[in-house]
Amino acid sequence: MTADAGQDRRSVASYGEVLDVVDVGRVRLTRRYGCIRRDQFEIVTKEPFPSAFRDWIASRGELRERPTFYVIEAPGAFQLTVAPRAGRAILMPRLATDLTWQAQTAREIAEVLDGMLNHGSCLANTRQAG
């Protein structure tokens, strides 16, 4: 997923329109148009997210947990809503971040998740998102 993916489509895109889809190993990353200054990213796997992912991403901000999902609020950076048993997360970057940073952060999260799925949780402490 490149920072300028879908730039030609951005000028005529509607809310929620798919701009780009990339497979990062076992993780599918879908970029959707949110508004002129923010995209939304869907992070999906065919299996549940490992518990190590929750621990890794929770270190980036405030964690709020519910029975079937949790939300990470990284102040000034993003909100990530995760349904771990469903293997699905939605990344909502903050408007103050630029589109390049948004795409890079989404890709980094997908790469770390893929590493955890493939190699266990040993990669949990090697990368930082945001």
Image (cartoon, helix red, strand yellow):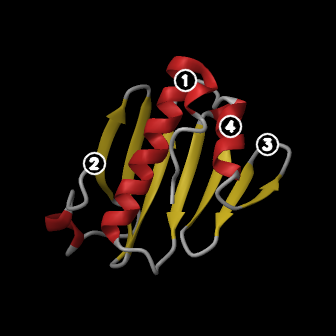
Q: Name the residue nearer the viewer: 55 or 40.
A: 55
Q: Which residue is mark 4?
A: 84
**Disc 2 and disc 1 in contact, CB within 8 angstroms:** no
Question: Could you tell me which secondary element the residue under label 3 belongs to?
Answer: loop
Left or right of 54 on screen, residue 98: left
Q: Which residue is mark 2?
A: 1
- Of mark 3 and mark 4, the one earlier in the sequence is 3
Q: Residues within 10 Å of mark 1 (few under 14, many from 20)?
A: many
For label 2, the SS is: loop
Q: CA distance from mark 3 to mark 4?
A: 8 Å
| Three-letter code for the amino acid on which mark 1 is drawn | Leu
Label 1 with label 3: CB-CB less than 8 Å: no
Horizontal relation, residue 55 to residue 115: left or right: right
Amino acid type, callout 4: Pro
Q: Residue at x 55, y 23 (%)?
A: 117
Q: Which residue is mark 3?
A: 68
Q: Which residue is mark 1?
A: 117
User: If you read the primary sequence from the N terminus, does the residue marked by circle 2 or circle 3 appear first?
Assistant: 2
Q: Are marks 2 and 3 in contact (CB under 8 Å)?
A: no
